[in-house]
């Protein structure tokens, strides 16, 4: 497989129009690669990195990334995949999120080969006449081809005109920066097509579209903040390593394909070994976890995270960095868990105890009335990752 073939097929969901993009790549002119993000939250996760890694590989071939910071559309909220409207954000929150977001973006993408553009450059002076002209570029029938819009409309849910404007505004970004290709996840296809349509209406060469898959999170659903199932780019090495090991076996081949550079023949072998049970999936998970920690932290921190995980969960030793909680009087285990942030409420603490997930000095707690006294310090453990050392004042 040629390098261009692999670039356009490995970890790729769809390319529109692939023949046009191949023709552009065969030329000598550096391509402009548009990637937009709405800084609605400050953290990126490794699902975002799937597309960022593709952008970096295009950069390594000499092409230019145009990063669009959606400081206007973030205040609307991307309706893709959402069954309800998103609460609006202030410009100050969006700007603060964007600063953090870009720090993470450039952990993968080469800053020197990236042009950063804020939507406020053109939407800051976008008057009513321009907005009405943009709105007239699409029909309601076209907008209802958007699966989320159509579903909400047919079910009688709330669907605002403001939300209908979102794909148009994202598409208008393409008119302003004139990209050759727009990158996004599969949930962005409609918005990317809006960019193609507006560019064609403006007499420009329409952008091609490069879509990458949405990877599953730690619970098997699409990785996303709303599901609390993400592996965040800024997550500490040990936590990142542990989260990868908590993934189900069946996602491993996809993760190796989209988040590592190992040869595709080896990815195929991993897929076969998992399918026929000829290898222990945990060995693959540990390798994948090392690869991911190395990528987002360093080659030195990956084996250190692995050694810590082995010590905690294979050898059943305690971690070396247990936080302390000081008590001044005998304290009930439920109250102690809340005071030391091991549980958010009494009901959660009781549920954890009922589930057998709470240990004191290595012994499982079976009731709510256990008292921790002021004598010898003891370690309280909740689940596999939460620890606190309790001692008297």
Image: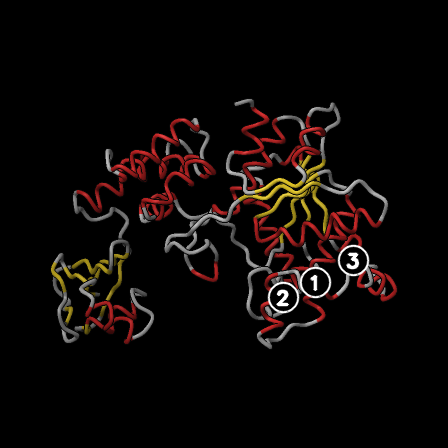
Residue at 84% x, 65% y: name it.
Answer: 132
Q: Nearer the viewer, mark 1 or mark 3?
A: 1
Relative horizontal placement of residue 53, taking residue 132 as reference (left or right): left
Judge from the rendering whether residue 366 lies leftward or rightward of residue 230; answer left or right. Answer: left
At 62% from the left and 66% from the top, the residue drawn is 150
Relative horizontal placement of residue 260, taking residue 314 as reference (left or right): right
**For the residue carrying disc 1, how many other residues have a C-alpha within 10 Å: few (<14), some (14-19), or many (20+)?**
some
| Residue 121 vertical position relative to residue 152 in the rendered view, above or below | above
Query: In this rendering, which labeled residue sits more in front, label 3 or label 2?
Result: 2
First of labels 2, 1 by sequence position: 1
The mark nearer the N terminus, 1 or 3, is 3
Nearer to us in this view, 385 or 220: 220
Q: Quadrant of residue 138?
A: bottom right
At 17% from the left edge and 74% from the top edge, which residue is drawn?
368
Residue 335 picture quarter: bottom left
Name the mark on residue 123. 3
Question: Dots 3 and 2: beta carbons under 8 Å?
Answer: no
Cβ atoms under marks 2 and 1 closer than 8 Å:
yes
> According to the image, label 1 marks what residue?
143
Name the element at disc 3.
helix
Q: Secondary structure at mark 1?
A: helix
Q: What residue did someone put label 2 on?
A: 149
Name the secondary structure under disc 2.
helix
- On the rendered structure, is 264 left or right of 95? left
Relative to 320, does residue 389 appear above or below in the rendering? below
Q: Quadrant of residue 29?
A: top right
Give the distance between the C-alpha atoms of the residues marked 1 and 3, in whole angstroms: 21 Å
Judged from this view, the residue extending furthest toward the right is 129
């Amino acid at each position: 497989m040629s390098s261009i073939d692999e670039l356009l097929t490995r970890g790729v969901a769809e390319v529109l129009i692939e023949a046009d993009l191949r023709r552009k790549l065969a030329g000598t002119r550096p391509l402009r690669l548009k990637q937009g993000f709405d800084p609605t939250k400050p953290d990126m996760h490794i699902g975002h990195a799937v597309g960022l890694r593709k952008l970096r590989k295009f950069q390594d071939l000499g092409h230019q990334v145009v990063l669009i910071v959606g400081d206007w559309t973030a205040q609307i909220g991307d309706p893709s995949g959402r069954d309800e409207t998103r609460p609006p954000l202030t410009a100050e929150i969006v700007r603060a999120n964007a600063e953090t977001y870009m720090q993470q973006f450039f952990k993968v993408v080469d800053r020197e080969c990236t042009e950063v553009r804020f939507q406020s450059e053109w939407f800051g002076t976008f008057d009513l006449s321009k907005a009405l002209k943009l709105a007239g570029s699409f029909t309601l029938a076209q907008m209802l081809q958007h699966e989320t819009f159509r579903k909400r409309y047919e079910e009688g849910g709330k669907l605002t005109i403001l939300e209908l404007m979102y794909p148009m505004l994202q598409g208008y970004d393409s008119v302003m920066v004139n990209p050759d290709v727009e990158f996004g996840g599969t949930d962005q296809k409609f918005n990317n097509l809006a960019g193609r349509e507006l560019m064609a209406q403006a007499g420009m060469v329409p952008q091609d579209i490069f879509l990458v898959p949405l990877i599953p999170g730690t619970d098997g659903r699409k990785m996303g903040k709303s599901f609390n199932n993400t592996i965040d780019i800024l997550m500490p090495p040990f936590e990142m390593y542990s989260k990868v090991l908590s993934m189900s076996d069946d996602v491993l081949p996809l993760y190796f394909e989209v988040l590592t550079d190992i040869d595709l023949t080896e990815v195929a072998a991993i897929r076969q070994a998992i399918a026929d049970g000829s290898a222990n999936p945990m060995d693959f998970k540990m390798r994948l976890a090392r690869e991911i920690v190395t990528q987002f932290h360093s080659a030195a921190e990956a084996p250190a995270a692995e050694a810590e995980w082995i010590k905690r969960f294979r050898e059943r030793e305690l971690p070396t960095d247990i936080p302390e909680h000081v008590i001044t009087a005998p304290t009930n285990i439920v109250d102690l868990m809340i005071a030391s942030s091991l549980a958010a409420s009494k009901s959660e603490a009781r549920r954890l105890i009922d589930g057998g997930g709470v240990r004191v000095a290595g012994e499982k707690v079976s009731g709510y009335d256990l008292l921790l006294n002021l004598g010898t310090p003891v370690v309280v453990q909740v689940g596999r990752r939460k620890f606190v050392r309790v001692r008297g004042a």
